[in-house]
Amino acid sequence: MANYIRDPNTLAISTINAAGASHHVTPAEWAALPASERKFTSSDPFGGLTGPNRDSYVALTGLLKQYGLEALAPTVLGMVQQNYSQDTVTVLLQDTPAYKTRFAGNAARIKADLPALSPAEYLSTESSYRAVISAAGLPKSFYDQPSDFQKFIEGDMSPQELSDRVSSASLLVNSLDPTVRAEFAKFYTTGDMVAYALDPVRAAPVVGQQVQAAQVAAGAASQNIDINAAAAEQLAGAGVTAAQAQQGFGNVAQLQQVSGKLSEIYGGTYTQDQAIQETFLGNESAAEKRKRLASAERGQFGGTSAVGGSFSAAANSLGVKKPGAV
């Protein structure tokens, strides 16, 4: 019968072979076992260890917890049960895939003739990187995994060098179009912008759309139109570019001005938001409200409608064939 062990903290089930190597048993594998075999070797979380062996197990699993490698506890248990010394287990653990992944930066350092960092040095360096990034106000999701720091460690980047890079990124942010920067600051944090400047490819999923939203809002501001973050993000998500925003908001301003005057005369409403929705997103409900105003004007004067003509010019200038196709 296999030697099954349940981790007392995670309740994960593992089996340990004669060499001390562990295999994680999936729920499906466990369920497939005959009931007679679904037994643990011991309910004791220390696997029956006593004395110095138990002390070694406690010390080693305590270190693994600091490293985020609690899953290796069954492996440690199996090795200590076979009377491997604490020092020997420490060395053997370094050959496990989980350990190599956690301290992955060391492999590249060794190839580059750089000294491998001890676990304590590795963790301390990561902590320093994290402090620099936190102080810069970068998004928490930007560097929150060990893998996020791997390239820095592989390249032997000091925390001070990282701090200098963040400062340089801040200067780059401050040199961007002041209108875009001002709109961005209304919606987001400086840390978001620094993250984007520091590593545009890495940051794209985090703040890329935020930058696009700021550019859209800047296009609106150029036409003296103020929009909120939700509207800017909606248009950015729809693929509206900075150039299209500037041109399109010129049309919105024209539509809103004419329709606003007609609303005062004939009643009804055609708001700025509706003009935006029609111009950029093809909102038919907004278009119908504008058309009703145009019909009222034509009925009054028997001629062409100013609001209707305005939208036609807007649509043509954006290169669209129907309302909202940007």
Image (cartoon, rainbow, N blue to C red):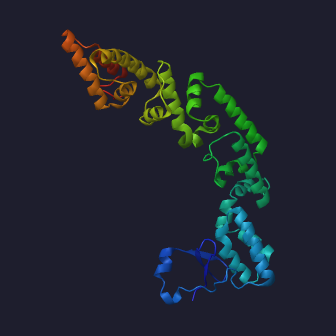
Question: At which x and y percent is residue 226?
Answer: 48, 24
Q: Is residue 233 above or below residue 276?
A: below
Work out whether residue 78 or residue 68 is closer to the camera in this orientation and state it.
68
- In this rendering, position of residue 88 left or right of residue 222: right
Q: Name the residue located 74 percent from the left edge and 53 percent from the top edge.
A: 109
Q: Is residue 257 above or below residue 166?
A: above
Work out whether residue 320 or residue 39 is closer to the camera in this orientation and state it.
39
Quadrant location, the N terminus: bottom right
| The image quarter in which residue 60 lies | bottom right
Q: Is residue 260 above or below residue 280?
A: above
- In this rendering, position of residue 165 left or right of residue 8: right
| The image quarter in which residue 159 lies | top right
Question: At which x and y percent is residue 199?
Answer: 62, 39
The answer to whether residue 118 shows anywhere in this view is: no
| The image quarter in which residue 162 lies | top right
Question: At which x and y percent is residue 128?
Answer: 76, 48
Work out whether residue 200 or residue 250 is closer to the camera in this orientation and state it.
250
Quadrant location, the C terminus: top left
- In this rendering, position of residue 285 left or right of residue 191: left
Q: Name the residue located 36 percent from the left edge and 27 percent from the top edge.
A: 274
